[in-house]
Image (spheres, grey):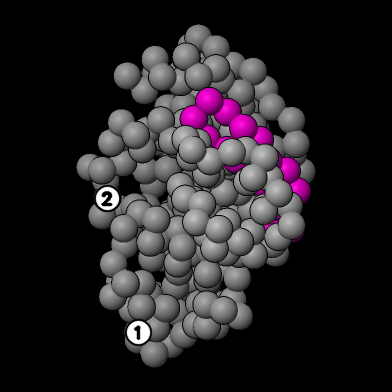
Amino acid sequence: MSGHSKWSTIKRKKGAADAARSKVWAKLLRGVEVAAREGGGDIDSNPSLATAVQKAKGSNVTNDNIERAIKRGTGELEGETYEEVSYEGYGAGGVAVLVSCLTGNRNRTAQDVRSNFNSHGGKMAEPGAVSWMFEPKGVLIVPKGSIDEDEVFMIAADAGAEDVRGSEESIEVITPTDALKAVRDALGGAGIEIESSELTQVPKSTVALEGSDAKKLLNLIDALEELDDVQDVYANFDISDDVLEAIAS
């Protein structure tokens, strides 16, 4: 599992996101709204919307809220206009950081993102400086247990997955972006539990961190994710499970 995925999983298990559930829901619904605006409100014909809805449901967002967000996106209900923007930079240890935002005020968002980089030992970079270090992919996390990794691989590969990676607690399935829904449906149809499913940016290579640099970087990621306009943060770090657990505690 990628470093960022492991960090997100550890925080979720420790309940770190529970206190900010309303903020998390607002971000997820904003993603649903924008996906519906750009590709239409039909989940079956809009893969981005299907992924956004699945992600929202995975965080227990209610169906009523999701439906209203779709209607705001399609213009059936009044809603704010959001713009997609991204920012790039470097964190502690030279780790590449890519920040994806949906905002109604580009100047405010840029200032907030820059301030957080500066406050946590990082720095902003020019567009294109780090984005080339990532590839857009679909990623599904399957919890381990009674599920055999070979079985997951066979089903996922037949549906279009590129890779399956096992760890102690979970199985990570990597797909092309346009195959995420098909792989998710195939695994679900086989009765396999899916812990999470999302379109993401997978780093082509990683930077190993430990000690104070590891803590600085994770603090930067957490601070960026707290910003209302930030939807996702991607970083190419590799931090050991023991260090991640220690910092989360």
Q: Which residue is mark 1?
A: 78
Q: Is 192 within the magenta?
A: no
Q: Determine if residue 28 is in view.
A: no
- What is the x, y in percent for residue 167? 58, 28
Spot occupied by residue 105 in the image (x, y as percentages of width and height): 45, 62
For the point 46% across and 85% down, the residue is: 74
Query: Extreme top residue here?
Result: 211
**Which residue is at a point 38% across and 65% down the rendered structure image?**
29
Position of residue 206 relative to residue 69, above or below, is above
Q: Nearer the viewer, mark 1 or mark 2?
A: 2
Relative horizontal placement of residue 62, taking residue 49 as reference (left or right): left
Cα separation between marks 1 and 2: 24 Å
Q: Which mark is residue 21?
A: 2
Q: Are marks 1 and 2 in contact (CB under 8 Å)?
A: no
Type of amino acid at the residue the image marks with label 2:
Arg
- Which disc number belongs to residue 66? none
Side of 14 where 205 appears, left or right: right
Q: Secondary structure at mark 2?
A: helix
Q: Residue at x 67, y 53 (%)?
A: 155
SS class of the residue under badge 1? loop
Q: Which span of residues is magenta-colored?
A: 160-177
Q: Residues within 10 Å of mark 1 (few under 14, many from 20)?
A: few
Q: Residue at x 63, y 46 (%)?
A: 152
Q: Position of residue 160 (x, y in %)?
A: 74, 58
Q: Is residue 20 left or right of residue 198?
A: left
